[in-house]
Image: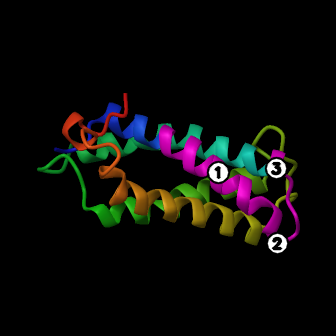
Amino acid sequence: MLPTLNGRLQTRIFMLVVFGGLITLVLTPILPDDPDYKTTYIILATVLVLGIIWELIYHGIQQFRWEKDWPTMFGLITAINEGALVWLLVDIGAVPGIDADSVPFWAFFIDFSVIWFVVWIWTNGPMRVPFIRWRFFGGRII
C-alpha cells in the first residue's frame, strides 16, 4: 500500500515529535559550540512546519509519476533540499526566536542529519512491527 498524503503527514509529524524530540533531548548537550535546547527545539519545529509544506509539494510532483510515489531512496535524498532551506532560514535569521548567524553550521548539520537518518531508517524498517496496520492504512498513524 502506498502512503497517502494524509498518512505521510501523520507519519512525518509523529516521527519528528517523538523521535526528533528524543534525539534532540539527548544530542543537544554534545553538539559543537553548545547550542541551547530552545534553539534546537525551535529548529525542530521549523523542520516540522516546513516539512508539511514540503509534503504538499512532493504530493504534487508525485502526481506526474505513474505509480504516484517515488523510490525509498528519494525519501533520504530529500534531506538535502529540506535541510538546505531550513539552514538558510536559520542562518539569515528568518526563523522567529533565533538570531541571524547564531547557530553554528556543524551543530545544525549534525542535529539535522542524525534526526533525519534515524527517522528515515525507522520509518522504512522497524516501524512496521509496532504499527502493523500502518502500511495497510496508507501510512496513517491515527
- Mark 1 vs mark 2: which is more N-terminal? 1
Name the quarter where the N terminus is drawn.
top left
Secondary structure beneath label 3: helix
Looking at the image, which residue is at 66% across and 47% down?
A: 44
Q: Which residue is mark 2?
A: 32
The residue sitting at the top extreme is: 142
Mark 1 vs mark 2: in front? 1
Q: Is residue 5 left or right of residue 122?
A: left
Would you say residue 36 sits in the magenta stretch?
A: yes
Mark 1 vs mark 3: in front? 1
Residue 30: where, in percent of width, then height? 80, 68
Q: Amino acid at mark 2?
A: Pro
Q: Is residue 72 left or right of residue 24?
A: left
Q: Is residue 5 left or right of residue 36?
A: left
Q: Which residue is mark 3?
A: 37
Closer to us: 36 or 68: 36
Q: Amino acid at mark 1?
A: Leu
Q: CA distance from mark 1 to mark 3?
A: 12 Å
Name which quarter of the figure residue 41 lies in. Answer: top right
Vertical relation: 66 (above or below) 53: below
- Tags 3 and 2 in contact by the CB under 8 Å rule? no
The prevailing secondary structure element of the residues shown in magenta is: helix
Q: Which residue is mark 1?
A: 22
Secondary structure beneath label 1: helix
Name which quarter of the figure residue 84 lies in. Answer: bottom right
Magenta range is 13-38
- Mark 3 vs mark 2: which is more N-terminal? 2
Would you say residue 105 sits in the magenta stretch?
A: no
Q: CA distance from mark 1 to mark 2?
A: 18 Å
Q: Residues within 10 Å of mark 2 (few under 14, many from 20)?
A: few
Looking at the image, which residue is at 17% across and 51% down?
A: 65
Q: Amino acid at mark 3?
A: Tyr
